[in-house]
Image (spheres, rainbow, N blue to C red):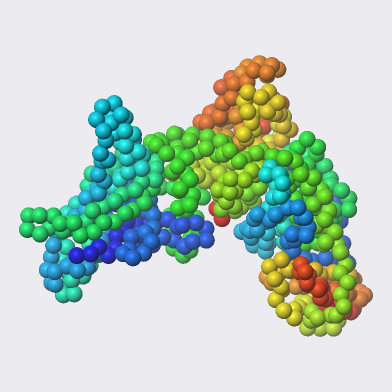
Amino acid sequence: MKIEEVHFNYDTSSASADAINLRKNAAGGPIVAPEWKDGQTPQAAAYASAAIGNQVNIKARFSGGPSNGSRQIRALDAYLPPAVPSGCLGWLLSLIAQILRALFGNILGDVQKATVAFDGAGNSSLETFVLINHKLKTSSVGVHTTTWKWQVKHGKKWLDFGTTQHQIYLVLDIPNGPWDQSPSGNNTQLPWVDALDKACLWALGAKTKDEAARKITLAINGQPNQSYTPVTMFGFTPPYQLTSYMNQIDSGLPFSLNCTDCADAVTTFANLLGCDLWEGRFFNMVTRRFLPLNGNPAVDADWVSWNWGYHEICWLNAIGQNQDIYDGCLQIDMDNNYSDTVHIPRNPVKMQFGLNGPDDYRFRLIQSGAGNLENIPRRRAVA
Amino acid sequence: MPGENVLPYDVRALRQRISEDRAELFLGFSPWPQDASGWSRSIKEKLTSAPGKSMRRTVWDSNDNRDARVLIDVIECPSAAGAIDALLEELAANQLALLPEGPPRLGIASFMHPEGVPPAVFFARGNLCIRVISFARDAVDVVLWAERLNERLSDEPHVERNRIVLESDRESARAGEEVPVFYTLPWALGEDGYLKFRVSGATLVAREGRLFLKASKRGDVQVRAYALEPRREPYAGSLNLTIE
């Protein structure tokens, strides 16, 4: 008996019982099931937690079965807990192993047994299997590895006949714009695995959209090789040059970007996880002193003020004075005395834009000027 | 109150700088290693851009300072008017409330960051909008870089032989009429090769891979084309037309 194929995204029109539509990146084409095929490099799959219904299925195909016969087949999680020494060290190692498993281990559970029929040549058709004990509804954002031990029943015994390994991303909901799920053609706006690698790492462990958006904002703001320039580097007029941005991050070399680039990044990566952010601008302001990208909050000279024609940030659900915002480009000063050298940095994360309240983003950012909102929500297409 | 981004630049005056009887057009231009002695090109990308435009990005890293990098984007537009529009888009995409004009010799219009801001310069020349940006923590004098590029764009190459075939489907045309211009190169250009067209008596636009010239008044039109590549002899071609 041999496992030939495993299909996770077998229905490209739905994500309630199977995986979502993906592509590798802008240049690579859509990932088409089977994601696992014997002898080929496995491809990733991703599930959108909120979209998952009561039952999650996979499909699989086998060869080497009994001619014109049938067999019961299942797959079990192949994970074996590591042997740990006794005592405190053992307890600690066991705890670490459990945490790592929760963060990166199997979330697909096991494959429930099913009876598979074989033709005269011993080949099966594409059979549907139900996943049991999966954690797709309860787990958090992450990149997980599932290793399944495939078994066939002989008499009363289950015998191993193959092992498959799968890279599974879990996001909170169906990705929002600029991403979409249209399977037709070479849709470059299908979620990219290369972007999921980053978003799922940055928002690792997030269980809510607020938490995911917060983690993404902090990650964008905290990329160590970035510095601020007023120039939009990765696309003001669409598309957003996501590939170019990710190349810069991966290079490890220093580079600069502005607020539009940060808003693009936060929106694009957060919405990949199912958040609902929009980019939007406001105009004409002299700012209070804030901490730009990679500024040191303890160094007074790093707190700077700018005369801006516009500033672009991320808005939760919609643009409006009473809406909540995320700003990955800077940290504001929550210290009430703006003339001294004491600063209390805060990342603007789910902060009301507001007006003149001490907890309002607008009050903390704008010293003078209109700061009028442009009611044009944007989600720039990615390239 | 709803906001609107009203740019504080005299757009009309910028557009009026475009000549109606003289043109330059560049196809495939990008910075060469000899434009950046002491620097290494770490990135060369062709970025997705709006229809009709192309955008080539190069990033140059200082050989002895990790924190000194220069990014150069060459935005190739169909025409000089398109290049001015691209320059205006650059200004709109800049957070600074107002950018001062750059050196007057830089293209037909240029703007730059004021002192104290990470350096950047933007200029339009022919159908190109070029932005040169100090791309890392240490400030680099990007005006020098822009001037080197501008020099290469304005350079009149000395050419021994006309080997570019430059022709039209007519010998004369009426004022206001679009005339297609065809060119044939003796061989394909390498990845850093580019074409430079100089026109007197008319304007020249590139549309869907084809060239068209248009004269606003009667007279003689001359088109001169150059093919240029690093470490290779330049070659040229010319075309004369009468506008009736």
Direction bottom: furthest residue:
B170
Q: Kindly identify the residue that appears in the image at 15 percent across and 57 percent down.
A: A159
Give the total number of marks visible in the rendering.
0
Left or right of A21 in this view: B174: right
Q: In this rendering, does residue B80 appear at all?
A: no
Q: In this rendering, does residue A265 appear at all?
A: yes
Left or right of B205 in this view: A63: left
Q: The N terminus of chain A lies in which quarter of the figure?
A: bottom left
Q: Kindly identify the residue that appears in the image at 37 percent across and 53 percent down.
A: A45
In x, y percent, where is residue A153?
Answer: 12, 58
Q: Nearer the viewer, residue A367 or B43?
A: B43
Q: Quadrant of residue A14?
A: bottom left
In x, y percent, where is residue A266?
Answer: 54, 41
- The vertical placement of A356 against A41, above or below, is above
Q: Kindly identify the residue that appears in the image at 26 percent across and 27 percent down.
A: A87
In x, y percent, where is residue B226?
Answer: 81, 72
Direction left: furthest residue:
A155
In x, y percent, where is residue A129?
Answer: 22, 56
Q: Nearer the viewer, residue B89 or A300?
A: A300
Q: Kindly identify the residue that appears in the image at 25 percent across and 39 percent down.
A: A83
- The vertical placement of A354 against A107, above or below, is above
Q: The C terminus of chain A lies in which quarter of the figure?
A: bottom right
Q: Quadrant of residue A259?
A: top right
Left or right of A130 in this view: A314: right
